[in-house]
Amino acid sequence: RTIRGLSQSTDVPEGALVRWVLARWASEGASGLLELGPTFTRRLHAVCEDAEAAGDDAARLAAYHQLRQMIAWVHHPLAHPEVYDMP
């Protein structure tokens, strides 16, 4: 229904909309890599790999907490743009 309604309201064929949605979805991984950068992406991935290699729930829980802290650090300026204010 969503695609059909959007097609009718924009006068864009349904097939063209579906192709656009699929192309956007398929390119999100590459976009995410470009935004995070290869170094930070590798650091995030290493946390997960290490936890899986340990193979127990305690390691997975520790990895979750580590990932949460890493993401919070990156997110902080988005939530607090004043950190960029000059005195």
Image (cartoon, rainbow, N blue to C red):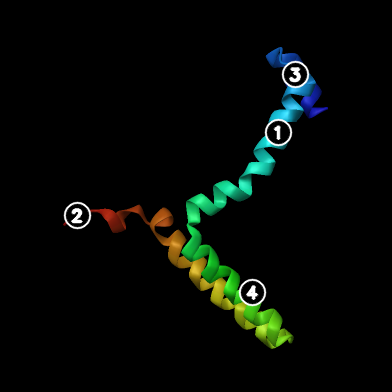
Q: Nearer the viewer, mark 2 or mark 1?
A: 1
Label 4 sits on residue = 48
Position of residue 9 relative to residue 70, above or below, is above
Separation of marks 2 and 1 at Cα, in angstroms? 41 Å
Q: Amino acid at mark 4?
A: Cys
Q: Amino acid at mark 3?
A: Ser
59 on left or right of 4: left
Q: Residue at x 69, y 83 (%)?
A: 53
Q: Nearer the viewer, mark 3 or mark 4?
A: 4
Label 3: which secondary element: helix
Separation of marks 3 and 2 at Cα, in angstroms? 47 Å
Q: Amino acid at mark 2?
A: Met
Marked residue nearer the N-terminal end (3 or 4): 3
Indicate which disc residue 86 carries. 2
Label 4: which secondary element: helix
Label 3 sits on residue = 7
Indicate which disc residue 21 carries. 1
Q: Amino acid at mark 1?
A: Val
As rendered, which of 86 and 23 lies closer to the eye?
23
Q: Residue at x 70, y 33 (%)?
A: 21
Position of residue 47 relative to residue 26, above or below, is below
